[in-house]
């Protein structure tokens, strides 16, 4: 294996780039691109939902490829897939091709986001990978904090096509060579049996899959609707947009706290605390009125930050490093399907009342809290 001295910062910055050029891309780019094509933004966001579905379908395959070929190779292919999709977006001659480019982002998402990066860390450090996972997650969060401003700055200079091309060049010229030549690589999986035999579902895997599905559904719904939700709670539009930014800042703070303070705590206890943060913020805002509305953004952001670390650490804690990549890909697959449906479902709840929406999200989080009580590390793990 090559030197791993700089693996964690390189992985983290690669994750930041991947999130900035996929999840957070349309937040800035949808309006100017749609105007140029004389179309609305709705088809682009529908295409993004399709991209999430494609990611869900391909994620188990990505996990098998990580297990067989190693995470660095899979990450390199994902960077190439992102670069090709962004190239389609930059060169799109019409609206349908523009939507196709957004859909193709789902191929890169399937193997290019946290799951593969966490698997590389586990390849390097095994059971002791928690702090490295938290560090990768912390740096990856910069994709949300800095992705929009960078996209906006590039857009203002070279236009929307140039901004798509910018992220494509970064993927192809910077991120892909880093994955190929600088990240640690291991040999292919040592036994054909280990690769070919499936990972069997068990009650603990079902609980973890349900936990991640609920957590990602709430997180995606809030990410899509938080400014509108805050406005419905009584804030004016400008203040709501500013307050919504507290979610990203709080998520970064939570990752930093996990890295520096909570790294010795049990991950299951951390996950339980994270599941209660959204209901706590929702309760404060519901009782105290508009002036307390920022509690929703802060509570959700803190929960997001801790749960992003948990998505990498909980499978490692419960099952250990054996077959980590493939098992984690299976655990996160239902979450990706729920992620695609969550914005629409939350919009329906918000049309009834912002308090109904807050209550729905809180009930999901409370269910997650209950699910954690069935999780515990066990030495009686399935061998495959």
Image (cartoon, grey):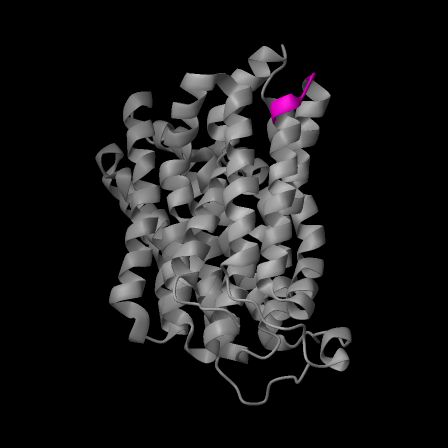
In percent of width and height, residue 66 lies at 64, 65
State whether residue 357 is above or below residue 166: below
Residue at the location (36% across, 68% down)? 131
In percent of width and height, residue 193 lies at 76, 81
- Looking at the image, which is closer to me, 268 or 230? 268
Residue at the location (30% across, 76% down)? 264
Q: Is residue 92 inside the magenta stretch?
A: yes
State whether residue 373 is above or below residue 302: below
- Looking at the image, which is closer to me, 268 or 169? 169
Residue at the location (35% across, 43% down)? 248
Q: Is residue 243 visible?
A: yes
> Left of 125 or right of it: where is 207?
right
> Left of 314 or right of it: where is 294?
left
Q: Of helix, strand and loop, which mostly describes the magenta segment?
A: loop
The magenta-colored residue range is: 90-94
State whether residue 191 is above or below residue 30: below
Q: Is residue 31 visible?
A: no
Q: Is residue 152 inside the magenta stretch?
A: no
- Looking at the image, which is closer to me, 364 or 123? 123
In percent of width and height, residue 51 lies at 65, 40
């Amino acid at each position: 294996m090559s030197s791993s001295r700089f693996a964690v910062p390189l992985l983290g910055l690669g994750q930041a780039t991947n999130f900035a050029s996929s999840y957070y891309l349309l937040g800035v780019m949808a309006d100017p691109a749609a105007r140029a094509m004389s179309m609305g933004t709705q088809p682009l966001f529908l295409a993004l939902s399709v991209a999430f579905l494609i990611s869900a379908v391909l994620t188990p395959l990505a996990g098998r490829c990580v297990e067989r070929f190693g995470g660095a190779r899979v990450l390199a292919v994902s960077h190439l897939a992102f670069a090709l999709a962004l190239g389609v977006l930059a060169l799109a001659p019409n609206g349908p091709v523009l939507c196709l480019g957004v859909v193709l982002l789902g191929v890169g998402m399937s193997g290019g986001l946290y799951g593969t990066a966490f698997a590389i860390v586990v390849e390097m450090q095994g059971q002791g990978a928690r702090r490295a996972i938290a560090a990768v997650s912390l740096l990856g969060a910069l994709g949300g904090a800095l992705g929009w401003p960078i996209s906006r700055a590039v857009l203002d200079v070279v236009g929307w096509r140039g901004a798509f091309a910018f992220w494509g060049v970064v993927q192809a010229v910077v991120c892909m060579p880093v994955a190929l030549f600088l990240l640690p690589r291991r040999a292919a999986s040592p036994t054909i049996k280990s690769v070919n035999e499936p990972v069997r579902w068990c009650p603990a895997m079902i609980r973890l899959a349900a936990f991640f599905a609920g957590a990602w559904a709430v997180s995606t719904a809030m990410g899509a609707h938080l400014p509108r939700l805050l406005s419905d709670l009584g804030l004016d539009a400008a203040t709501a947009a500013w307050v919504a930014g507290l979610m990203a800042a709080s998520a970064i703070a939570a990752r930093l706290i996990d890295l520096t303070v909570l790294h010795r705590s049990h991950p299951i206890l951390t996950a339980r605390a994270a599941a209660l943060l959204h209901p706590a913020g929702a309760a404060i805002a519901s009782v105290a009125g508009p002036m307390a509305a920022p509690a929703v953004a802060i509570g959700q952001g803190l929960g997001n930050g801790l749960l992003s670390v948990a998505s990498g650490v909980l499978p490692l804690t419960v099952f250990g490093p054996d077959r980590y990549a493939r098992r984690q890909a299976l655990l996160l697959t239902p979450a990706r399907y729920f992620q695609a449906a969550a914005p629409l479902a939350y919009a329906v709840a918000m049309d009834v009342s912002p308090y109904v929406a807050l209550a729905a999200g809180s009930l999901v989080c409370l269910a997650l809290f209950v699910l954690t009580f069935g999780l515990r590390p066990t030495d009686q793990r399935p061998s495959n």
